[in-house]
Amino acid sequence: MKKISLSIKWLACVATACMAFSAQAQECLVRLDQTEVDYGVASHERDSQRNLKNGMVGLGRKPLSLNISCPNPQAMQLTLEAAAGGSNEFRFANKGRYAVAIGAATLDGREVHLAYARGGRPVLDTVSKWKRFGMDANIVPVRDGKVEMGKNFSAKLWVEARIPREELIVKQQEYFNGYGRIVVDALNPL
């Protein structure tokens, strides 16, 4: 049987620790309950017809828990940094794609909705309980039509990956990896 081991590795950090040009966020602790989403071993014989759409094989959805803790209340902007893979998707193993949705969010123990932020400003007509990360789509917590400030943010992430069907045909075991990084920035809520 031909095998492919599939995984996506995650790095969670604050902007001040990860990106020199974005030093406006306070030192917030960002934690994920796991740093790797492992899709296990796939085989052409077993998986080539599973969730087939547009020549891509769906590998299923995997959950992650995200927790952010800041020393002082702030308006948070979340960004997923990863290699571009198309509209609201990121590259997985060069040819594969994955998407990340975020929802079931709370800020300081109270439920919040989520909105996109573009150009450092919230887009409040995009508010909902779940959002999908995109290349130019940062996400902010909102309540009652306003960006909400807080110290402790928690949310569920759903990672959904897919690869081209032909990638399941291999002569030996191959490893397909993707990488992503969750970055927290301070947002000017005005």
Image (tube, rainbow, N blue to C red):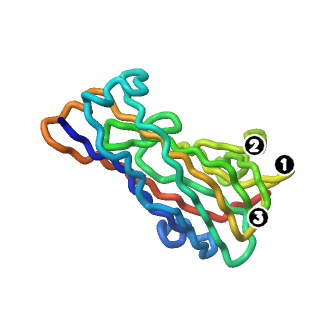
**Observer able to see residue 59:** yes
Instruction: Identify the residue under disc 3.
Output: 109
Disc 2 to disc 3, C-alpha distance: 19 Å
User: Which of the 4 image quadrants contains residue 154?
Assistant: bottom right
Q: Which residue is mark 2?
A: 127
Q: Residues within 10 Å of mark 2 (few under 14, many from 20)?
A: many
Vertical relation: 151 (above or below) 160: below
Q: Residue furthest bottom?
A: 71
Classify mark 3: helix, strand or loop: loop
Up-down relation of residue 189 to residue 95 (above or below): below
Q: Is residue 3 left or right of residue 117?
A: left
Residue of label 1 = 145
Dot 2 lies on which element?
strand
Mark 1 residue crowding within 10 angstroms, few (<14) / some (14–19) / many (20+): few
Q: Marks 2 and 1: CB-CB under 8 Å? A: yes
Q: Residue at x 61, y 50 (%)?
A: 138
